[in-house]
Image: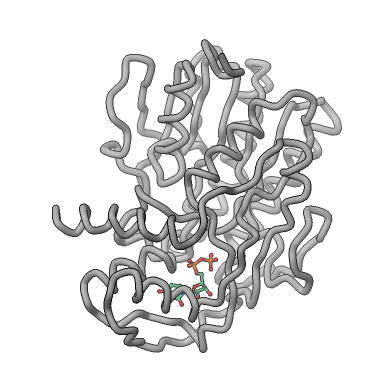
Amino acid sequence: MTWYDGKRVLVTGGAGFIGQHLVRELLERGAEVAVLDDMSTGRPGNLAPHPRLTVEEGCVTRLPDPGPVDMIFNLACRASPRHYQADPVGTWRASVYGVEQVALLAEKHGARLVHTSTSEVYGDPEVSPQREDYVGHVNPVGPRSCYDEGKRAAETLLYDLHRTTGLPVRIARIFNTYGPGMAADDGRVVSNFVVQALKGVPLTIYGDGSQTRSFCHVRDMVAGLLALGGTEGIDGQIINIGNPGEFTIGELAEKVAALCNVPLVVSPAPLPADDPRQRRPDITKAQSLLGWAPKVPLDEGLADTMAHFRDVLALA
Ligand code: UDP
């Protein structure tokens, strides 16, 4: 028996990459789940039919009321630079107007709210690892700003509502997440490299490959989000959820090529504007407040991501 057993949970963005795994775990824990997704990057096919699952197509900026809910997980936002930059105004609206709608719905139903923010609130960080009290180094008008500043504005709104009205919100700052269920056209580095290696084409390293990221397997991410939602006494907390293992993009390319048993051939491309030089979470807070830490090593996680993409490419 967990906190979720018998609870009614709304998951916005529930048909997306992380959402599909979260929904499956919630159903396994006995929750009744309502999904709202605009299917911009989510896919209805990501969710297997289940007697305790309903799926509605719609946008958080015009959030329909699914009726009484005990909890909301707000995952609704494009998260890959390729996708959020394709519709920067829509991204900003989902991040800001959408989050206001979600907060109003949580207030209306007295629901606990877990909001997914991002390591992008730290921008191109000048400190490493990044702790939650680091205020960030963010360009307000660059190509990443719709996402970075949208997510920062959402945190501002939710934190003010928590301070002024006691909104029971918990905020996850999610670091780079990968794993089975990613779309082949996601555009982020792990899916790009694995798909390229499996197809036997050169890997697209942007810049000199010395920039770093810390990759968290989706299974660990979902365990962290469930702990954030199911722990008592942590309303108003903002917590990094990520894997502190830090790798350069060049190292990631080498790992993926070795795993797929192909020689590493690189197709160099320019480093995108404002691409963060480094990124690594300090997870002390998650460990102490949630008793959570990631368990899946990168090599193991890349292997099951590769198996996923082998299936996807075989079906294509
Ligand atoms: N990147 C790359 N090749 C790709 C896709 C991304 O070298 O095909 C780099 C990108 O420039 C960044 C890092 O990999 O430095 C992570 O990019 P991603 O889009 O996965 O996520 P981000 O952390 O930048 O939001």
Residue at the left extreme, as displayed: 315
| Residue 98 position in % (x across, y down) | 56, 40
- Asked which quadrant contains residue 7, the reply is top right
Q: Position of residue 5 (x, y in %)?
A: 53, 14
Question: 75 and 126: which one is in front?
Answer: 126
Corner quadrant of residue 119 = bottom right
Q: How did the renderer colour the structure? A: one colour
Name the quarter where the C terminus is drawn: bottom left
Residue drawn at 36 percent across, 87 percent down: 266
Q: Nearer the viewer, residue 68 or 231?
A: 231
Look at the picture and state if 102 lies above or below 209: above
Nearer to the camera, 199 or 146: 199
Left or right: 216 in relation to 197? right
42, above or below 161, in the image: below
In the shown orientation, is residue 73 left or right of residue 203?
right
Q: Horizontal placement of 293 versus 237: left or right?
A: left
Disc count in the image? 0
Picture residue at 21% right of the left edge, 53% below the top? 311
Residue beneath the point at 68% across and 16% down: 110
Vertical placement of 209 versus 309: above or below? below
Instruction: Determine the residue positioned at 77% across, 30% down.
Output: 235
